[in-house]
Image (cartoon, helix red, strand yellow):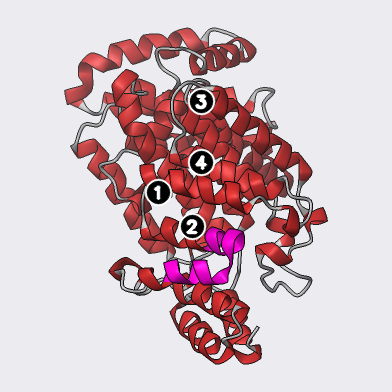
Amino acid sequence: MTAVADTLAAIWHIESAKVVGAVARLTRDLALAEECAQDALVAALEYWPVHGVPDNPAAWLTTAAKRRALDVLRHRTQAAPKHAELAVELDTQHTIRAADFAEAVDAALDDDIGDDLLALMFTACHPLLSPEARAALTLKVVGGLSVEEIARAYLKPAATLAQRIVRAKRTLAEARVPFETPRGAELTARLPSVLEVLYLIFNEGYAATVGDDWMRPALCEEAQRLGRVLASRLPDVAEAHGLLALMEIQASRLAARVDAAGQPVLLMDQDRTRWDRLLIRRGLAALAHAEGLPGPFGPYTLQAAIAACHARAAVPADTDWSRITAFYDALMQISPSPVVALNRAVAVSMAFGPAAGLELVEALTIDPALKTYHLLPAVRGDLLVKLDRIEEARVEFRRAAKLAQNARERALLMARAATGE
């Protein structure tokens, strides 16, 4: 039983989005599609241990979910016109071999008119929803994670996450959001919402905002997996590849971001031989693809280009900080924000000296958006250390530690306050 359950869990993580997407394409109801997919999962837990894992488990789950959808729709009198169409399709599928049905499912996923997986991603990331709701719903219906897994990742009560997901699906249903991949101008308008969600998920894994862990690599891996799906289905959309490049290159550093005791290691102190060269190659390839497409660079492509400068430097001294500063200048032109300005100040300090960087940081101290942002005093403290203003630096590190919500990061800042380094 345990072996079958483990096998099913692995299959579900990979195939659940396809199952939900296939049913949603027929029902045009994301909530119903997910319910039917979950019913199919329960059925598999009961059936497979007795009869064995089917030759094509994805097709089995999809068929079971569609049959469940038909049963539900038969009890919805207002959906009567759809019943006959759905019944005909299911009856036809029931007469063909499982292998043939699997091929039909794969063909549907590649269909230019309705790519189920891509449509599912755009639906879950609809801008009607808050970024937090989009992230939770995406991890649930596209990533195949359970509510409990999502709650653990974000250190939230499972009940809170469950309510957020239910409300998100209700909002989509009430707004009658169509289950489809947007095209043309609408795709351009909706894409930032999808990219934002994937990067939010990645960043929460790369630098956890709360809790005891510095990182949550599982979230990074999920965001990268979904990013690869998105980029493969949007080959001519530069920012999809720019985001993928950014995530791959940043993820290459994960192993080097903590020491043997699990304590954070800052970028300039990392052992670069521990950076994952395969992920760097993948990231640089995705960046080259994005840069080769027509049009100006978008914000994710520019951030990926910055990450690439670090990836190409065998040792910190080889980093081209002038080039990084130029990329931040471009980023400030198209996507200005106080955080980008702070990062640019760091680049300026590395390229032109700590005094130049500190001058820029001082100007940001009056920005209300950074009032509770712990990295502002952390950066100021670092620059003050380089200028031998140690006591002032200690004050800044203590201030940063009070604002930090991650326990590991707080400990690092308190240690810097104690040593003045």
Q: Is residue 386 above or below residue 320?
A: below
C-alpha distance separating marks 4 and 1: 10 Å
Q: Which residue is mark 1?
A: 332
Q: Write the start and end of the magenta stretch as one range.
A: 346-361
Residues at discs 2 and 1 in contact (Cβ within 8 Å)? yes
- Residue 40 visible (yes or no): yes
Q: Which disc, if any, is residue 62? A: 3
Q: Amino acid at mark 1?
A: Met
Residue 12 highlighted magenta (yes or no): no
C-alpha distance separating marks 4 and 2: 13 Å
Determine the secondary structure under disc 4. helix
Q: Position of residue 185 (x, y in %)?
A: 30, 22
Would you say the magenta stretch is mainly helix, strand or loop? Answer: helix
Q: Which residue is mark 4?
A: 302
Q: Which residue is mark 2?
A: 344
> Mark 3 or mark 4, which is nearer the start of the sequence?
3
Residues at discs 4 and 1 in contact (Cβ within 8 Å)? no
Q: Is residue 66 above or below residue 375?
A: above
Which-is-in-front pick, marks 3 and 2? 2
